[in-house]
């Protein structure tokens, strides 16, 4: 099994592996981590079989180690994701992901009447519930819930 | 030095219960003896992006009676806003001319945003369906003044409890004072779950009803709001309930001596004019209280009390 996986997404020497991303969230994760602005080698695999949730995606980024703050941002779209730090082909650390207490500039406010949807004002939310995710807008004070999460 | 100095008032949640009381106490002292000239060398700007004549006149009267000066506009149509100026640019410009900004804007969160970019403090005079904290403070003032206390009262809220901004803010503010709530509304316009959860968390009692004729005798305060036809998905539903949420003089017969009727105004027909002559009708005095409360807020923020 694991040999087969190695074939579909090649191993990295040093860097970060983010596994167990729901396949539908792959592009959200890419944009949240700003991977398009990273120069180092990145491999993606998607629509891989997963016992847990049908199709999953995996991202391997060489020579990059994300801060906890960055990693926790992806909790909104891939709360089950697992993170491994790789050094010399060995998994050195494994992290699970926790949703932070506040979110800035990743999610759109659900309220069309909100100032953040009218003027160039970055969004800010307090996380009032983590399971399920409920975000309270710092500006209009309305709740954006999991069903209405739209990434900016 | 007051803890409120230089602190914008955007949402009723910005003030602690102690700070709410502090404002009420200052307003009370202003009502007894108004310190004419207190705002003599102060300029207050009023940016009204949508018409709200009563709120604007109340603020302007509050400032004028303390000898302060007003600059601003009452309709965005007549200002540079129509030429496409952003809220940010307007706020930054106006900050140069004034010591404090009062803003009313239909976009929700606009006052919070203004308070973050303006170098001078900002008072929210209503941001869409979101917040209108000076209304809430004048409601609290009216309740305390008529009941002698804010603690342990039985508050009846009647009408549109789903969309009513004033109802929600007042509910939050009163939840700090051991209040018992009776919510009287059509099924479609009940208090949103989130607010009930807050009351439950604080261990407060609340009861929901669809009619109040039988129970009004228990009320200390009856806070009336309008039930609007547009709020109903089924017009027939509106026709069925429209007369239930109208307060008539005959309903006041067995009410408590101390009971008072409040309404954020303007009223349409939800309080029958026959009620106006009752000593329990308090909605016009309530509006006057808004002047003292707004004076107290401005004076506290400018560090003058
Ligand atoms: Zn918002």
Image: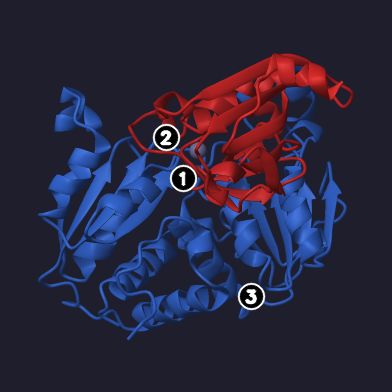
Chain label for disc 1: A
Q: Dot 2 surroundings within 10 Å: few (below 14), some, or many (20 or more)?
A: many
**Residue pointed to by mark 2:** A116
**Residue pointed to by mark 3:** B150
Q: CA distance from mark 1 to mark 2?
A: 8 Å
**Residue pointed to by mark 1:** A139
Q: Dot 3 surroundings within 10 Å: few (below 14), some, or many (20 or more)?
A: many
Q: Establish if B291 lies above or below A64.
A: below
Residue A70 on image: x %, y %: 53, 43
**Residue B199 in which image quadrant:** bottom right
- Nearest to viewer (mark 2 / mark 3): 2
Residue B84 or residue B216, whichever sits in front? B84
Q: Residue at x 31, y 48 (%)?
A: B114
The reply to whether the residue tagged 2 has its Cβ within 8 angstroms of ligand 1 is yes
Chain letter, colour blue: B
Residue B279 on image: x %, y %: 60, 65
Q: CA distance from mark 1 to mark 3?
A: 29 Å
Q: Are marks 1 and 2 in contact (CB under 8 Å)?
A: yes
Q: Establish if B220 lies above or below B274.
A: below
């Amino acid at each position: 099994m694991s040999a087969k996986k190695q074939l579909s997404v090649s191993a990295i020497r040093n860097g970060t592996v983010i596994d167990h991303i729901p396949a539908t969230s792959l592009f959200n994760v890419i944009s949240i981590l700003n991977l398009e602005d990273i120069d180092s080698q990145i491999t993606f695999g998607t629509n891989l079989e997963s016992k847990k949730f049908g199709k999953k995606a995996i991202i391997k980024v060489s020579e990059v180690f994300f801060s906890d703050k960055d990693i926790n941002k992806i909790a909104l779209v891939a709360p089950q994701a697992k993170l491994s730090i790789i050094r010399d082909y060995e998994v050195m650390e494994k992290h699970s992901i926790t949703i932070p207490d506040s979110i800035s500039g990743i999610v759109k406010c659900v309220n069309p009447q909100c100032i953040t949807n009218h003027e160039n004002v970055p969004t800010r939310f307090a996380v009032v519930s983590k399971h399920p995710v409920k975000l309270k807008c710092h500006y209009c004070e309305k709740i954006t819930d999991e069903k209405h999460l739209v990434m900016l | 030095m007051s803890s409120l100095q230089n602190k914008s008032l955007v949402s009723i949640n910005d003030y602690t219960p102690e700070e709410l009381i502090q404002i009420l106490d200052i307003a009370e002292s202003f009502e007894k003896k108004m310190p004419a000239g207190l705002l003599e060398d102060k300029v207050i700007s009023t940016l009204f992006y949508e018409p709200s004549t009563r709120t604007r006149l109340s603020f302007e009267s509050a400032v004028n009676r303390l000898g302060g000066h007003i600059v601003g506009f009452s309709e965005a149509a007549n200002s540079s806003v129509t030429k496409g100026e952003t809220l940010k640019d307007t706020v930054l410009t106006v900050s140069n001319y004034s010591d404090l900004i009062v803003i009313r804007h239909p976009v929700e969160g606009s006052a919070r945003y203004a308070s973050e970019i303006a170098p001078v403090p900002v008072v929210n005079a209503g941001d869409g369906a979101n917040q209108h904290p000076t209304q809430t403070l004048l409601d609290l003032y009216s309740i305390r003044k008529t009941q002698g206390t804010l603690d342990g009262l039985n508050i009846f809220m009647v009408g549109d409890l789903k969309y009513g901004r004033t109802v929600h803010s007042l509910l939050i503010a009163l939840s700090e004072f051991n209040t018992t709530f009776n919510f009287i509304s059509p099924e479609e316009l009940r208090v949103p779950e989130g607010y009930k959860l807050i009351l439950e968390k604080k261990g407060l009692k609340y009861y929901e009803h669809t009619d109040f004729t039988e129970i009004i005798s228990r009320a200390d305060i009856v806070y009336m709001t309008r039930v609007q036809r547009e709020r109903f998905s089924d017009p027939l539903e509106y026709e069925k309930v429209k007369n239930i949420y109208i307060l008539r003089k005959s309903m006041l017969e067995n009410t408590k001596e101390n009971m008072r009727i409040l309404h954020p105004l303007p009223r349409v027909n939800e309080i029958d004019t026959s009620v106006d002559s009752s000593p329990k009708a308090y909605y016009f005095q309530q509006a006057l209280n808004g002047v003292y409360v707004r004076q107290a807020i401005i004076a506290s923020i400018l560090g003058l009390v």
